């Protein structure tokens, strides 16, 4: 049984346009109820085993929520190290999508040994920060191996440089105008550049432009109160905020980048802009991790307060995972979980009236095979955390 479920996406055609987009989910959103009645430590051990996709981000959000619910202080080095592990996971997730899916879309062979080598990133990064028994526990002891962690950053940088950009990541990230972008497409022969070059040359980069409505920052107390309401299950399945349907994606995180702002002028918020946002975020990660390592080494053992003004014995964990904002809410009493909820980015992005539905509605539908191809590209650009089945009716 697939414990994470899947999405069914139906495109209903009428003449040469999409008349309706239906997004149906079999995701087991009530799975967190398995944690109720269990000790907090048992929950923290279960979360990364149950959620194989973005398991590090899930574990990080869980431990944040539980520490807050138990009013625990932790060292700021621990918090930073856990955030660094999530960033490594984001790099791996982006690389997997690019090296596997984008190669397929570009009709290029998948470098399977290279893809397989990425499976060592997370275990090595974790072992460079904590003993295995201390991973995402309430009060872990940091055991940071700077040399080992730097080797992970170098692996990410070398993989992106050689297999994705044919440039150093920092060079790609510094790209700020459409002319340098087009030059990069013309001289680079990777799967990613080939795919984007096809979008440009076939004039399909604008397809799927249904706008961009970034999920705003939400006060933790307001979010916790919303999740405590009687209709919380419905909200988790089809979330909105103050009546708005928002997205939380690499594009919303990277929207201020100068190159993306120029691409919006040419392609709107269609395929080209969304796919380039992932590349730019990937390009930013090595340098960001190098800075975090220096910060971590320089921190002098202070603690970070995990308490909040939320209701007593309640905590909210919030993490920017690869696919968007991930929220966990924990309610505990005497170390036992009374209630647990997870709100994942897929529920925002694949909301029945959300960004994917709007984007798919904009696709031309006169040619069935072309429609399927562009729909797959757009779904991949937003990227659900589970598999999907696309049906054209």
Image (tube, helix red, strand yellow):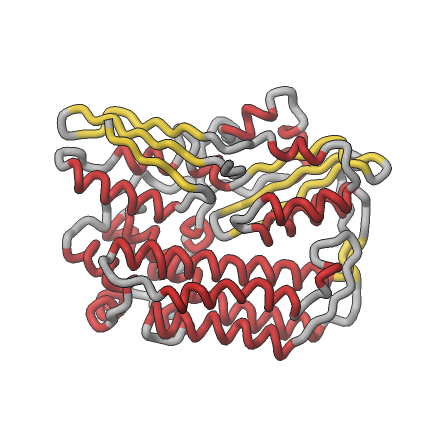
Horizontal arrangement in the rendering, residue 130 relative to residue 20 (left or right): right
| Residue lying at 36% horizontally and 61% vertically, measured from the top left | 99
| Left or right placement of residue 73 versus residue 263 in this view | right
Q: Classify residue 365 by image quadrant.
A: top left
| Count of labels in the image | 0
Judge by depth and name the residue closer to the eye, 380 or 349: 380
Residue closest to the eye, 310 or 113: 113
Q: Please report the residue visible at 79 percent of the width from the left and 65 percent of the height from the top.
A: 302
Image quarter for residue 84?
bottom right
Give the vertical position of 180 relative to 196 (above or below).
Answer: below
> Residue at left 68%, top 36%?
221
Residue 154 appears left or right of 63: left
Q: Looking at the picture, how far across and down is residue 145, in whole percent?
A: 67, 75
Image vertical order of residue 287 relative to residue 201, above or below: below
* 171 sits to left or right of 308: left
Given residues 23 and 271, the one toward you in this image is: 23
The residue lying toward the viewer, choosing from 13 and 6, is 6
Q: Residue furthest front?
A: 1
Residue at left 64%, top 40%?
A: 328
| Residue 178, placed above or below residue 208 | below
User: Which x, y percent locates residue 101?
Assistant: 33, 54
- Quarter of the picture containing the C terminus is top left
- Most distant residue in the right direction: 334
Q: Which residue lies furthest to the top in this view?
A: 230
């Amino acid at each position: 049984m697939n414990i994470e479920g899947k999405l069914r996406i139906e495109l209903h055609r009428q003449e040469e346009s999409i008349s309706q987009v239906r997004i149906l989910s079999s995701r087991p959103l009530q799975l967190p109820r398995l944690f109720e009645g269990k000790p907090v430590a048992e929950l923290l051990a279960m979360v990364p085993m149950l959620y194989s996709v973005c398991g590090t981000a899930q574990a990080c959000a869980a431990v944040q929520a539980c520490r807050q619910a138990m009013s625990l202080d932790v060292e700021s080095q621990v918090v930073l190290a856990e955030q660094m592990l999530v960033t490594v996971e984001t790099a791996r997730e982006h690389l997997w999508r690019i090296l596997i899916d984008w190669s397929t879309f570009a009709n290029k062979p998948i470098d399977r040994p290279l893809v397989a080598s990425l499976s060592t990133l997370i275990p090595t990064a974790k072992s460079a920060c904590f003993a295995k028994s201390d991973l995402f526990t309430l009060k872990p002891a940091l055991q940071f191996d700077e040399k080992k962690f730097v080797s992970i950053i170098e692996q990410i940088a070398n993989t992106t440089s050689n297999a994705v950009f044919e440039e150093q990541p920092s060079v790609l990230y510094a790209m700020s105008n459409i002319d340098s972008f087009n030059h990069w497409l013309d001289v680079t022969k990777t799967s990613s550049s080939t795919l984007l070059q096809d979008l440009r040359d076939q004039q399909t980069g604008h397809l799927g432009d249904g706008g961009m409505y970034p999920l705003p920052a939400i006060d933790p107390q307001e979010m916790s109160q919303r999740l405590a309401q009687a209709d919380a299950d419905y909200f988790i399945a089809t979330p909105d905020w103050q009546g708005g349907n928002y997205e939380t994606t690499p594009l919303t995180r990277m929207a201020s980048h100068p190159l993306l702002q120029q691409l919006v002028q040419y392609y709107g918020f269609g395929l080209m802009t969304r796919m380039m946002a992932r590349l730019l975020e990937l390009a930013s990660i090595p340098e960001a991790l190098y800075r975090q390592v220096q910060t971590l080494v320089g921190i002098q053992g202070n603690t970070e307060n995990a308490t909040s003004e939320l209701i007593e014995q309640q905590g909210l964990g919030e993490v920017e995972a690869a696919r968007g904002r991930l929220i966990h809410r924990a309610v505990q009493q005497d170390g036992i979980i009374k209630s647990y909820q997870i709100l994942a980015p897929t529920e925002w992005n694949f909301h029945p009236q959300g960004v994917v539905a709007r984007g798919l509605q904009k696709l031309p539908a006169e040619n069935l095979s072309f429609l399927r191809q562009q729909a797959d590209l757009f779904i991949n650009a937003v990227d659900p955390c589970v598999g999907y089945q696309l049906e054209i009716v």
